[in-house]
Image (tube, rainbow, N blue to C red):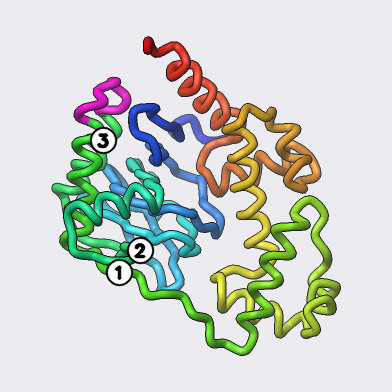
Amino acid sequence: MGRPRQEWARHWRYEELPGLDLLRARYVQHTFSRHSHDGFTFGAVTSGVEDVSLPEGIVRARPGTVVMINPEVPHSARAGVPEGWTYATLYPSVELVSDIAGAVTTIRGTPGFAETIVEDAQTAQLIAGVHRAAEEGNALAADSLLRVAVARLLGRHGHALPSRTPTASGARSAALARQLLDERMAAPPSLERLAQELSTSPFALLRAFKAAYGMPPHAWLTNARVRRARDLLDAGTAPAEAAVAVGFTDQPHLNRHFTRIVGVPPGAYRKERARTYKTDRERPT
C-alpha cells in the first residue's frame, strides 16, 4: 500500500453481530478525507492521538475518550502526534442503535448524541473488548459487550435527534442536486450544467449544498461512490468492476479514495467480506 510498515488495519464484519462493521487499526501517515457514514461511529483510541475534524471544530481523541459521530455527519481525521494513533472503532447501523435505545432508554425517535467526544475510559475498554471477543470468535461476549457499551453511551449522552426540516432558500436545490448526482453517479454533470438544470447559479448551488450536507457536491459524490462500491464489494464484485460501475476512471482511482474514506484498500475490504461470507456458509445448521 506504500505505507510505513508500522501501519496496519482490519475492517471487517463478524457474522454473529449483524448490523455492525468493525475497524481496528494503527495509522501514522494515513489521513481520512472528509466523508460521512449512514450509521453511527464509536471510536476508542488505545494509544497516541487522533485529530477528528467535525463541523464544529477539531476534537483530540486520546486513550480514555470515546468519539461518537451521528449518521451523515461529515468528518475527517489524521494523526495528532508524530507516532500516530491506534484505535478500535464500531460502526453500528441506525437500526441496531435504535433497537438498543428502545430497550434501555426513554428516547423516542432516532437516537443520537449532542457531544462528539467524552471522557469515558470504561466504555472505551468495552469497545476494545468487542473487538477482542469478535476476533476470538466469542459471540456471546462480543454481543454482550457491544450492547452494554452502546447502552452506556445512550444512557449517559443520548437524546432524540431533531427532525431535519431544511429552511434555507437553497435547501430544495441542494436536495435535488444530491438526487441527480446519486442517479447519475457514473457520469455526473458539471457544476454549471447541474446548476442550469436546477435554475440556479453554480456558486449559489455550492453554498446551498455545503450548508445542507457539510461537503461540496464533488466531495459528497466521492463519498457516495465509495459507499456504492462497498455495496458492490459486499456482493462479491471485483474492485476493478466496482470502480467502473460507480464512475471512477480506474481501479487505482477507487483504491485511493476508498482507502482514504474506509481506512483499508478495496481488495483487503473484499477479502474480509469473502472470509465472513465463507465462514457463515460453512456454519452447521
Quarter where residue 25 is shown: top left
Q: Secondary structure at mark 3?
A: helix
Residue topped by disc 1? 160
Q: Secondary structure at mark 2?
A: loop
Give the image location of residue 211, x and y in percent.
56, 78
The residue range painted magenta reads 133-141
Give the image location of residue 259, x and y in percent.
58, 42
User: Which three-letter amino acid code belongs to the residue tagged 1?
Assistant: Ala
**Is residue 103 visible in the rendered structure shown here?**
yes
Predominant SS of the magenta segment: helix
**Of residues 53 and 238, the one drawn nearer to the viewer in this rendering:** 238
* Camera-side mark, 2 or 3: 2
Identify the mark at residue 110; answer none if there is no mark: 2
Q: Is residue 135 magenta?
A: yes
Q: Residues within 10 Å of mark 2 (few under 14, many from 20)?
A: some
User: Which three-letter amino acid code belongs to the residue tagged 3?
Assistant: Val
Count of residue discs = 3
Q: Is residue 50 magenta?
A: no
What residue appears at the point 48 percent right and 30 percent down from the top-left corner?
Answer: 5
Marks 3 and 1, Cα distance to the nearest angstrom? 25 Å
Marks 1 and 2, Cα distance to the nearest angstrom? 6 Å
Q: Secondary structure at mark 1?
A: strand
Are the residues at dot 2 and dot 3 in contact (C-beta closer than 8 Å)? no
Are the residues at dot 1 and dot 2 in contact (C-beta closer than 8 Å)? yes
What residue appears at the point 73 percent right and 40 percent down from the top-left corner?
Answer: 243
User: Which three-letter amino acid code belongs to the residue tagged 2?
Assistant: Thr
